[in-house]
Every structure is written in structure tokens, then in C-alpha cells.
Image (cartoon, grey):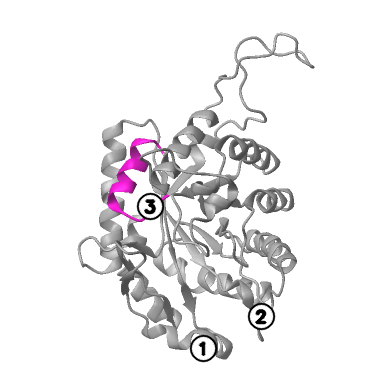
């Protein structure tokens, strides 16, 4: 069995063929897709966060709205860039959205990826401390976030408050019990996967990671997951971790599917530089007739090692088509692989 969800980047544009031409379209259609995915029997609705782009940049209003419209489906991010986040505001917003959703948030966070602008977090008023990199800043803020999500009091109360205080130091409110265990780290390397395990975060591994061995992407991803699980065991945490991977997967069941994605069946891993120092490997997409697709996915070691699979969806093609994409996987592919 696997937990199956969708991952939307929430793109919008006015280009011909786009069904999502504005920020309003992107947000409202994201809610509708989550509602439809729950009705189909999917397990998760996840959203990617990018700043300074025509994508979903402010996650918590969206997560809260999805939580209010649904009752069962997991609601998550993959991922929120912690270089842009105040961890205390994050904890308050996340607590409120999680309570609205009845404890269904699964929040993926990370140090972020290359963005649309240079050092965009500076425009948000943030600077690394002396001797820190932006990645160090993101990880430091993550540790603060994890600490405050524990719900312990840390703030000295005013002796003459506007409203009566409970005894002792005060914590952030609203506090949502259990949210700390539903924080995931979006890891692009083996080392950061190990770091996430030591801190007790779940692991999100996408279709991009550092090219550390020259092996096929799915093999490197499986080794990353193995290293993460070993580090988790060494840390002695008292629960089982969760691990997700994301893939672009399309079952070709109609002429429209073949027109959109038939050429993607020849996809291969790609290697490139994501910055001046980092060589990365990008995993392939999958697009084939269902029986062929089943055999291809059966050989993917990364998917096999994960308990959660996020299907990246072409959101600009509209809600109806993306419901069809999800339904095709749930009906024709997942049962054959034992995911259902």
C-alpha cells in the first residue's frame, strides 16, 4: 500500500491553452482539485511554494481553505522555502490551518531551490548571520520552528496583561498537537536527508537531487532513502518515519493523453548544474499505456522505497483534465502495483 497524492506548482499564465490565467484561477482551482481528489479516493493534496513567480506563493490561506472544504485528504506542501520564513509566524499560521483541517497538514519545508530573483529572501527583510550561508539560515530557522511546535512555553508573561495568563511561560497560540511530527524536510542530498532524520522530520525527495554517484536517478534516490532510514534508526526516535517521492506519471488512456504526453514516453534522466557548484540529476517522466507503465514503475527503486508518492500534475490544463490524470493512475496503475 502507498499513500498517493498530487503535487501542484499552481502555475498561471495567459498563454493560449492555459485554463489558469490568473492568481485567482490558480487558488480556486487548487481548492477544487483537492476536493475532487478526495472524492476519487486519493490520499493527499500538496502544493509547491515559489516566490516572485506566477505560482502559489502564500500557502497557509490555501491550506486552510482546502482544509475547510475537505474532511479526509492530507493537505501539504512540497516545499516551503525556510529562507523566506519567520519561524514563529510560520508556527502560528500552521497551527491555525492545521486546526481548521482537523490535524491533516503535512508540511514540507526546505532550504529552497534557485529562485526567480537573486537572494529574494533579502526583500523579505532576512539576512544570514555572520558566517552563515542562506542554507545555514534556513536550517537554523527550521530548528527554531521545530522547537516552538513542541508547544513548550518560552515567553515571559507580562505581569499586567490585557487578559489573564495561564501560569508559567507562554507558548505560541494556536497550538496544534501533533503537527511537529508532520513536518517533512525536502532533501536534495544524502547529507541533508541524514540531518533531517536526526531532527525527527519526515523525508521528501523529489525528482531532483545532487548527482553524488553518477548512477541513475532512482537508484541514487533509493540510496538517499536508505541513508535517511538508517540515520532515523540510529537517532532512536519512537515512531516510524514517512518518506515521499514525487514523479510525473501519465497513463495514456485517450487520444488527448497521447497528444499531451505521448512524447514524454521517451524521457530520460538529465544531468545539469543548478548553481555554480552543484551538479544535479533530474529524474525522468513516465508516460505510457497502463500495462507498459506498470512495468516501468515496478523497476523504479525510489518509488519502491517510499511510502508516499506525489504525482505532479499539469495544473494549467484545468481541474477536469487533472482529475482524469489522477483517476487513470488510481484505476489502471495503482492496483496492479499493489498500491491499492
* Helix, strand or loop status at disc 1: helix
Find the magenta span and give its range.
Answer: 186-200
Q: Is residue 93 left or right of residue 205?
A: right
Q: Residue beneath label 3, please?
A: 187
The x and y percentages for residue 123 are 58, 52
Q: Which residue is mark 2?
A: 18
Q: Nearer the viewer, mark 3 or mark 1?
A: 3
For the N terminus, the image quarter is bottom left
Secondary structure of the magenta portion, mostly? helix
Whether the residues at callouts 2 and 1 have beta carbons within 8 Å, the answer is no
Q: Is residue 143 above or below residue 36?
A: above
Element type where label 3 sits in the image: loop
Q: Earlier in the sequence, mark 2 or mark 1?
A: 2
Q: Is residue 108 magenta?
A: no
Between the C-alphas of marks 3 and 1, the distance is: 33 Å
Q: Nearer the viewer, residue 336 or 201?
A: 201
- Which sits in the foreground, 224 or 240? 224
Relative placement, left or right, of 219 versus 247 is left
Q: Residues within 10 Å of mark 2 (few under 14, many from 20)?
A: some
> Closer to the observer: label 2 or label 1?
2
Residue on which disc 1 sits: 258
Amino acid at each position: 500500500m502507498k499513500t498517493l497524492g498530487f503535487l501542484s506548482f499552481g502555475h498561471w499564465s495567459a498563454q493560449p491553452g492555459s485554463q489558469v490565467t490568473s492568481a485567482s484561477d490558480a487558488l480556486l482551482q487548487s481548492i477544487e482539485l483537492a476536493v475532487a481528489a478526495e472524492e476519487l479516493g486519493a490520499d493527499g493534496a500538496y502544493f509547491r511554494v515559489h516566490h516572485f513567480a506566477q505560482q502559489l506563493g502564500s500557502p497557509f490561506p490555501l491550506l486552510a481553505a482546502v482544509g475547510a472544504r475537505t474532511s479526509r485528504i492530507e493537505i501539504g506542501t512540497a516545499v516551503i522555502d525556510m529562507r523566506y520564513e519567520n519561524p514563529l509566524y510560520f508556527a502560528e499560521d500552521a497551527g491555525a490551518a492545521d486546526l481548521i483541517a482537523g490535524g491533516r497538514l503535512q508540511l514540507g519545508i526546505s532550504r529552497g531551490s534557485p529562485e526567480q530573483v537573486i537572494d529574494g529572501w533579502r526583500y523579505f527583510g532576512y539576512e544570514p548571520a555572520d558566517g552563515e550561508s542562506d542554507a545555514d539560515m534556513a536550517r537554523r530557522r527550521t530548528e527554531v520552528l521545530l522547537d516552538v511546535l513542541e508547544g513548550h512555553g518560552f515567553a515571559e508573561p507580562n505581569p499586567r496583561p490585557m487578559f489573564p495568563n495561564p501560569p508559567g511561560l507562554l507558548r505560541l497560540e494556536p497550538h496544534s498537537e501533533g503537527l511537529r511530527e508532520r513536518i517533512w524536510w525536502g532533501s536534495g542530498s544524502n547529507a541533508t536527508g541524514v540531518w533531517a532524520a536526526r531532527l525527527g522530520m519526515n523525508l521528501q525527495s523529489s525528482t531532483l537531487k545532487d548527482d553524488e554517484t553518477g548512477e541513475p536517478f532512482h537508484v541514487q534516490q533509493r540510496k538517499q532513502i536508505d541513508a535517511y532510514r538508517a540515520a532515523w534508526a540510529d537517532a532512536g526516535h519512537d515512531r516510524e518515519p514517512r518518506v515521499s517521492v514525487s514523479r510525473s506519471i501519465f497513463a495514456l488512456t485517450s487520444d488527448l493523453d497521447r497528444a499531451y504526453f505521448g512524447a514524454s514516453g521517451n524521457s530520460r534522466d538529465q544531468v545539469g548544474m543548478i548553481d555554480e557548484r552543484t551538479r544535479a540529476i533530474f529524474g525522468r517522466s513516465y508516460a505510457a499505456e497502463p500495462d507498459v507503465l506498470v512495468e516501468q514503475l515496478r523497476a523504479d527503486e525510489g518509488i519502491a522505497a517510499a511510502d508516499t508518492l506525489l504525482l505532479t500534475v499539469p495544473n494549467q490544463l484545468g481541474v477536469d483534465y487533472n482529475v482524469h490524470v489522477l483517476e487513470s493512475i488510481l484505476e489502471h496503475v495503482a492496483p496492479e502495483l499493489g498500491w491499492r
